[in-house]
Image (cartoon, rainbow, N blue to C red):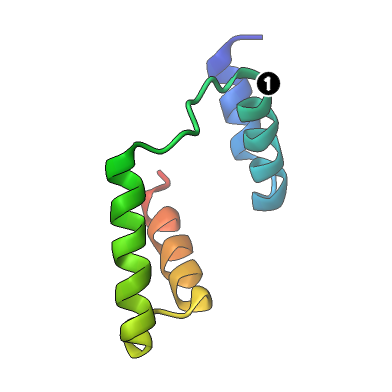
Amino acid sequence: MRATEILEQIDKLPPKEQQEVAEKILEKYGDFDDELTPEQMAELERRAEELRQHPERGIPWETVQTELHGRLKSRKP
């Protein structure tokens, strides 16, 4: 089976199963450097401090999740 055929089959799966397949592929074939650079750590610390000082500026996870799902759905052919 060719990669394009596999991807077509994955597209037919329910979203939860698509996510499981993606996670398994990343676990097996993903070769990522999970270490953050000092610059990335400094930026995360800066953002965390800003949120501690101004919690009203934060966006609830549910809102972010809903927005992301909407964006992903609009990108599918």
- Of 32 and 65, nearer the camera is 32
Image spot of residue 13 (x, y percent)? 69, 42
Q: Is residue 27 above or below residue 58?
A: above
Image spot of residue 55 (x, y percent)? 38, 86
- Rendered-image quadrant of the C terminus: top left
Q: Which residue is mark 1?
A: 28
Q: Quadrant of residue 1?
A: top right
Q: Specify the farthest residue to the top.
A: 1
Q: Is residue 33 above or below residue 73?
A: above
From the viewer's perspective, tell me whether residue 15 is left or right of residue 57: right
- Of 47 and 21, nearer the camera is 47
Q: Quadrant of residue 52?
A: bottom left
Image spot of residue 42 (x, y percent)? 30, 52
At 41% from the left edge and 38% from the top edge, which residue is drawn? Answer: 36
At 38% from the left edge and 59% from the top edge, which residue is drawn? Answer: 71
At 31% from the left edge and 86% from the top edge, which residue is drawn? Answer: 54
From the viewer's perspective, tell me whether residue 27 is left or right of residue 46: right
Q: Specify the farthest residue to the bottom.
A: 56
- State how many labels appear: 1
Q: Amino acid at mark 1?
A: Lys
